[in-house]
């Protein structure tokens, strides 16, 4: 079996047997994949430190064995591709990261490579790690909309309308004939988020706690309308509590 080098973002870990893990990761070369990581849960300090590599959100450099005919792949070597300064220890940033990881878990259905998707995920997590409070507060909105665009339902057309139609994925000046829309400040903030060219610009977009809750709830509806079996997010109540 051929060995490949790829970067990966860990999405989920599951205990396997007495000492191993099965890790779901979004890889730069192969899209979403599952890997068996043997022996990392043994009762030793070395094993405990190795488990840390596979926390959801970790960005790794990996050498992997890959076969298109297998659902479970194997890892030869792994190391940090990026070492977080704050993301795993800051309560707010960690809650935002877990929200990002969970919407990826609910959205990514097929193991198809998408380098642009990988770049969005890895770069957004790194930006979150270094972000100030203003950027951190708006980053879940930004990431959700960017993810939607990568998944193929980008918000299209003129952004000047004061109503965002969640079902049609566009802005309009007239109320739609269904309940799936946001208007007023929520729509205006959404338009500003879409027009942001980088994460650093999010800090100048003014939004309060109530508005962000409304908008994020609407974005979940937006994704559920376009992704079959999207489901409910367990990270949502935690994000609501910590995101000021």
Image (tube, rainbow, N blue to C red):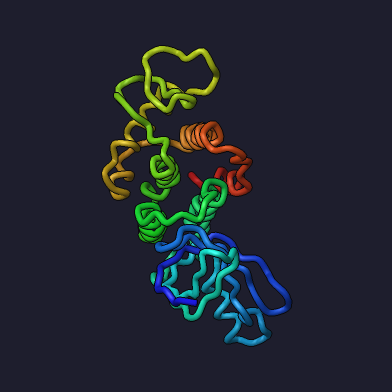
Q: Position of residue 145 (x, y in %)?
A: 41, 40
Residue 228: quarter of image: top right
Residue 190, horizontal then vertical, whole percent: 38, 32
For the point 41% across and 68% down, the residue is 7
The residue shown at (41%, 50%) is: 136
Drawn side of residue 235 relative to residue 3, left or right: right
Location of residue 145 with respect to 96 vertically, above or below? above
Q: Position of residue 133 (x, y in %)?
A: 39, 51
Residue at the far left: name it: 197
Q: Is residue 67 visible?
A: yes
Write down the quadrant of residue 48 in the picture: bottom right
Residue visible at 59% across and 63% down in the picture: 71
- In the rendered view, tell whether residue 152 sits above or below residue 18: above
Q: Residue at x 37, y 18 (%)?
A: 172
Quarter residue 201 falls in: top left
Depth order, front residue of 194/1: 1
Image position, residue 111 (x, y; %): 50, 55
Across the whole image, how many numbered discs are drawn on residues? Answer: 0
Of the pair 101 and 189, the residue shown nearer to us? 101
- Judge left or right: residue 194 versus residue 100: left
* Residue 210 visible in the shown view: no
């Amino acid at each position: 079996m051929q060995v490949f080098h790829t970067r990966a973002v860990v999405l989920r870990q599951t205990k396997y047997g007495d000492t191993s893990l099965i890790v779901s990761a979004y890889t730069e070369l192969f899209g979403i994949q599952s890997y068996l990581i043997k022996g990392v849960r043994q009762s030793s300090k070395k094993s405990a430190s190795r488990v840390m590599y596979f926390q959801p959100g970790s960005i790794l450099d990996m050498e992997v064995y890959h076969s298109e005919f297998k659902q479970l792949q194997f890892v030869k070597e792994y190391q940090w591709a990026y070492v977080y300064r704050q993301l795993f220890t800051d309560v707010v940033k960690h809650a935002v990261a877990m929200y990002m990881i969970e919407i990826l878990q609910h959205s990514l259905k097929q193991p198809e490579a998408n380098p642009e998707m990988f770049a969005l995920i890895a770069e957004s997590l790194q930006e979150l790690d270094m972000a100030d409070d203003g950027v951190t507060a708006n980053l879940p909105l930004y990431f959700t909309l960017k993810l939607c665009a990568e998944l193929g339902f980008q918000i299209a057309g003129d952004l000047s309308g004061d109503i965002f139609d969640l079902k049609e994925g566009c802005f309009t000046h007239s109320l739609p004939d269904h309940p799936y829309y946001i208007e007023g400040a929520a729509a205006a903030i959404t338009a500003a988020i879409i027009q942001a060219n980088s994460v650093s610009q999010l800090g100048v977009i003014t939004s309060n706690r109530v508005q962000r809750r409304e908008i994020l709830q609407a974005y979940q509806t937006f994704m559920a309308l376009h992704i079959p079996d999207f489901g409910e997010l367990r990270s949502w109540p935690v994000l609501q509590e910590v995101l000021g």
